Image: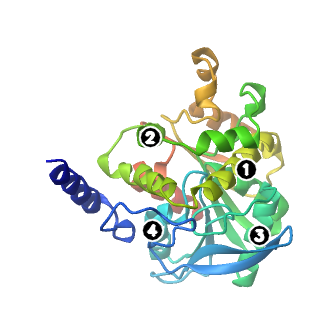
Amino acid sequence: MLRSMRTTVLALLLLLSPAWAQSPHLEPLGVALENLAYPHPVRFFPVTVEGQDLRMAYMDVAPTGPANGQTVLLLHGKNFFGAYWAGTIQALSAAGFRVVVPDQIGFGKSAKADIHYSFELLAQTTKALLDSLGATKATVVGHSMGGMLAVRYALLYPAATERLVLENPIGLEDYRVKVPFTSVDATYRAMLMPTREGLDRFYRAYFGTWRTEFGLWSELAWRATLSGEWPRVAKASALTYDMIYTQPVVQDLPRIAVPTLLVIGQADRTTLGRGALSAEVLATLGRFPELGRRAQAAIPGAKLVEVEGVGHIPHLESPDRFHAALLGFLK
């Protein structure tokens, strides 16, 4: 009976998963997702950080529609990787854009380095990647943690930033004011022993309206924990959590000098430190409708698109509305 139920669940997951994520077994995912296919070919860009020779994974997708000569850079969030942009890549390439999608160092198929992570470092390696590809100017689209990175990128390289698009970026508030500090070691120890149920709850909270196919993301996260190299992944994740906590960007928003679009799912309540906060304090954080309007007021000339009923990831939960806003801004 148990074997029959397991077979049924596996068949359902495969049916609901996009083709690039399908696997015949719930096998562990390697430290660099070696056994997970991406929606487009993956290449590697060599970088040296703190004396370590590392490799940064990326997809470079050519236009499928009439080429317009423009490049769009897609920056992923903390608990995801470049492959979750599959639908956005398709929409952009069909509209004539070249699309570059890196996995940042510490994420996805890139090296899981034990280094001091900073948004400046990630911006620098991303700029070096684009330069190596001959993409001297790009529209930068950042989701969640990728939004924080996109802000730093636009501030460091304004001449190389055509436009800026921030999709439910975290860091629109300074978490240090209300979220207790946690050392890297403590965060790392907490991450070493996740549960499947806990991961399911965590990923469900990202969506305003849950659909079964969204379970793919907690499934992939769980499979990563089954790897013998999970401690390396957990350490990199703890280090990048510390980066987010200690390097806010909200104070930098008024210095953004490129055309900017904010796309904000109005049902989003994402914040750091959710499990360590009282209900009273938690209620004051992650209020994205308010945060989006404050960010629009802070960024000179920014446009704001509010997506009602949608949570933290509009490009997955409501791709039609997200892509309409994105392409409308780009055109």
Mark 3 residue type:
Thr
Residue shown at the point (84%, 49%) measured from the top left: 255
How many angstroms separate mark 1 from mark 2 (CA)?
Answer: 29 Å
Q: Residue at x 50, y 63 (%)?
A: 85
Quote the CA–CA distance across marks 4 and 1.
33 Å
Which label number is shown at residue 91? 4
- Mark 3 vs mark 1, foreground winner is 1
Q: Are marks 3 and 4 in contact (CB under 8 Å)?
A: no
Is 49 situated left or right of 1 in this image?
Answer: right
Disc on the earlier residue, 3 or 1: 3
- Viewer-side residue, 257 vs 184: 184
Q: Secondary structure at mark 2?
A: loop
Disc 4 from disc 2: Cα separation: 20 Å
Q: Indicate which disc residue 239 carries.
A: 1
Between the residue at mark 2 and the residue at mark 3, the CA separation in whole angstroms equals 32 Å
Kindly identify which numbered label has been placed on residue 125.
3
Q: Which residue is depicted at the point 68% across and 55% down?
A: 236
Query: Which residue is at the front of the view, 265 or 11?
Result: 11
Callout 3 touching callout 1 (CB < 8 Å): no
